[in-house]
Image (cartoon, rainbow, N blue to C red):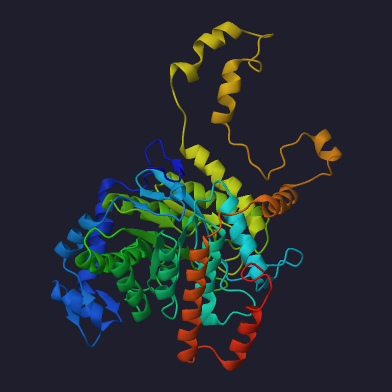
Amino acid sequence: MMAMKGFTRRFKPLEILTEEQVGEIHRATLAVLWETGVTFHSERALKDLEKNGCKVDYDLKRARFPEYLVEEAIHRCSSSYRVKARDPKNDLVIGGDTVYFRNFPGMQTVDLDTWEPRDPTRQEYNDLITVLDALPNLHAISPYPYYGYEGVPPVMRIPEGVAIKIRNSTKVQMTGNASDSDQFNIKMVKATGGEAILMAAGSAPLTWYDDQIRATYRAMEVGFPMYILQGTISGATGPATVVGSVVVNLAEQLSLIVLVQLLTPGMRVAIASDTYPQNMKSGVPGFGRIGCALTKAVENQMARSYGIPTRDSASGPVSSKKSDFQTGYEKALNALVSALAGANLILIHGSLYGEITAHPLQAILDDDIAGMVGRFIEGVTVSDETLAVDLINEVGPIPGHYLNTAHTREWWKKEQFVPRAADSLAYPEWKKTGKKGALDYAKERMEEILATHKPTPLTPGQEEEIERILKEAREYYRNKDLISDEEWAVYMKSLESLNYPYG
């Protein structure tokens, strides 16, 4: 069956831990799960865990996990699995040595003149997804990836975003959840015949809140895959040491994996984490720092030892507020290390500072980083044809050359990755063509994509069903008094646009 190709790591992954150290981290995680346990703000989850062998303190809302139960849950996890897209050619096969890239979300867009954040328009949201759909080295689309747009009430931001992604892309999407929005997200994705990768996000240290547990039960009921996300800040919500934070992450992630695998054995899951060192000067996370890469290298190696696919979120957000040199090196170094260390899904495209801003221009620049990283991990082929001994002997010393050979014509495109938004000109050409840089080329490419790329449209029946589900969500939140009269009036006016749902 066809699927999105992605990139294939063709050599042994980077291992910075010895086998003994892997065992030490695992034993430390098991000790935390049994001695301290994890808080679940969900009586339903606590009862299910207790019924299956966990020790539960209902006053503390704490579950402790025996070692055998954790080991059994790990063994039940699938090491590789398929995720269905709206278009089968965009299916993902997650696991093993396959590496996919995905965008990282930003709550708002960014003004390219001032570099300050602002809410996007509905048109700008559609444009972002159109660009992401067109990029060849982006294989899936993140939750949000803007947190709503102008005129949308907070509780409708996620469902409206899911609908925009469905309408403008046939790639697999991940969906977030808030205020039980996943019930509507799931319905919309199912209406197109595909699947989404759902999410449950823990709260460090060692806590699961009820809304995320409700989302987990919905994922189990529908049978969609899910990633189990943990976001530790080393030195704040986790120990200041890399491996200490990894232990906190794993304890929290494995606690939910136990619940999931007890109730739905073999359910498709992935370990995901947003782990950053604390900036001890400002108190904010140290986005883009090399500590992110070091932590991911350890986490990826641990996930591989469990046979559980892993998703890396920490390569996407950076500390820079602009599309500049700092943004480039923070993303590239972290993404390369993560790919070398065995990540299966790496978030990099589009984001700038933290999870605050994103822009399609940055996504285009990041697509070149993804392509470069992907080309590197695919390694080299050693064969009679690539060694080219006969050709070398035929060409001989100067004045011989290889430019006009059939071998060069066949192999240069296979061997090279050529970036699309980089300045690759010699000085004379550069001066004649306006002294353009990467940002200029990215802007030109963005304009070209928006003018020419036409995402596969929904069928009339699918479009009608998406709109019906959105209407159901609007009425649901309105009846729960989660949309004020003022918000409702602005929202309804925005839906009257002649270009709805695209502008």
Along the line of sight, the residue nearer the viewer: 140 or 29: 140
23 above or below 286?
above
Along the line of sight, the residue nearer the viewer: 376 or 35: 376
Q: Is residue 416 left or right of residue 497?
A: left
251 above or below 341?
below
Q: Residue at x 74, y 50 (%)?
A: 444
Q: Position of residue 203 (x, y in %)?
A: 39, 74
Q: Is residue 114 left or right of residue 90?
A: right
Q: Position of residue 98 (x, y in %)?
A: 40, 44
State which quadrant residue 149 falls in: bottom right
Q: Position of residue 432 (x, y in %)?
A: 86, 38
State which quadrant residue 51 falls in: bottom left
State which quadrant residue 410 falls in: top right
Looking at the rendered image, the quarter that the C terminus falls into is bottom right
Along the line of sight, the residue nearer the viewer: 261 or 342: 261
Q: Is residue 164 left or right of residue 453?
A: left
Q: Residue at x 19, y 70 (%)?
A: 65
The reply to whether residue 88 is in sight is yes
182 above or below 264?
below
Q: How many marks?
A: 0
Looking at the rendered image, the quarter that the N terminus falls into is top left
Q: Position of residue 354 (x, y in %)?
A: 56, 66
In the image, farthest residue toward the front: 460
The reply to whether residue 343 is in sight is no
